[in-house]
Image: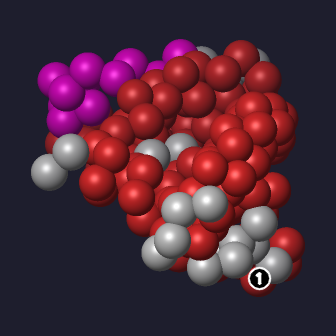
Amino acid sequence: MSLRRWLWEPLVGQLRQGLSPGRMAWSLALGLGAGVSPLVGTSTGLCIFLALAFKLNQVVMQVANYLAYPLQLLLLIPFIRLGEKLFGAPRLPLSVEVLSGALRADPWGALHTFWTSLWHAGVAWGLTAPLGSALLALLLQPLFRWAARRFQQVPA
């Protein structure tokens, strides 16, 4: 299945059903922003909250959230490192050998350390994601305005 059929056509379908280009852009941008949260397991609830709070399209937000999963994994370590810098925390060793050894030696201590690092990463994400989402929404709006004009002329 092509990316056009899997992603672009459903988005155009939302525009044809009356979703404004601005709401489409914000729904997609905030869904992606929430989707890269380093606090794994929180993004779906966050998308629901944001969609309700800002009256955005829930479907578009959740699609963006799920599309962001690979980015979430790619950004996990950078968010952890940024959180360490923000809080002056010691650098967490992120190798499998070191983490598994720490879990064997002191499971509760290792979980506490990792949770603290994730919490710091969450703060780093919270400081960067709103700006990134806003910039993405502003960049996407002209694209969705163009798509709305183009596809309003084509009968459904």
> Which residue is rendered at x = 62% and y = 60% of the image?
153
Q: Residues within 10 Å of mark 1 (few under 14, many from 20)?
A: few
> Which residue is rendered at x = 67% and y = 28% of the image?
83
Task: Tell me if residue 116 is in the magenta stretch.
Answer: no
Question: Residue 116's x, y, as percent?
Answer: 59, 44
Camera-side residue of 78 and 6? 6
Residue 106 visible in the current orientation: no
Residue 124 visible in the current orientation: yes
Q: Which residues are magenta?
A: 91-101
User: Which element type, helix, strand or loop, lies under badge 1?
Assistant: helix
Q: Quadrant of residue 58?
A: bottom right
Q: Is residue 24 left or right of residue 72?
A: right
Question: Residue 36's x, y, as percent?
Answer: 53, 45
Q: Quadrant of residue 63?
A: bottom left
Question: Residue 103's x, y, as percent?
Answer: 25, 43
Task: Tell me if residue 98 is in the magenta stretch.
Answer: yes
Camera-side residue of 107 and 21? 21
Q: Is residue 95 left or right of residue 121?
A: left
Question: Residue 84's x, y, as percent?
Answer: 65, 23
> Which residue is rendered at x = 47% and y = 75% of the image?
156
The mark total stands at 1
Residue 134 lies, with reference to residue 30, above or below; the image says above
Kind of residue indicated by mark 1:
Leu
Q: Is residue 156 left or right of residue 87?
A: left
Mark 1 sits on what residue? 52
Residue 50 lies, with reference to residue 140, above or below; the image says below
Residue 103 lies, with reference to residue 19, above or below; the image says above
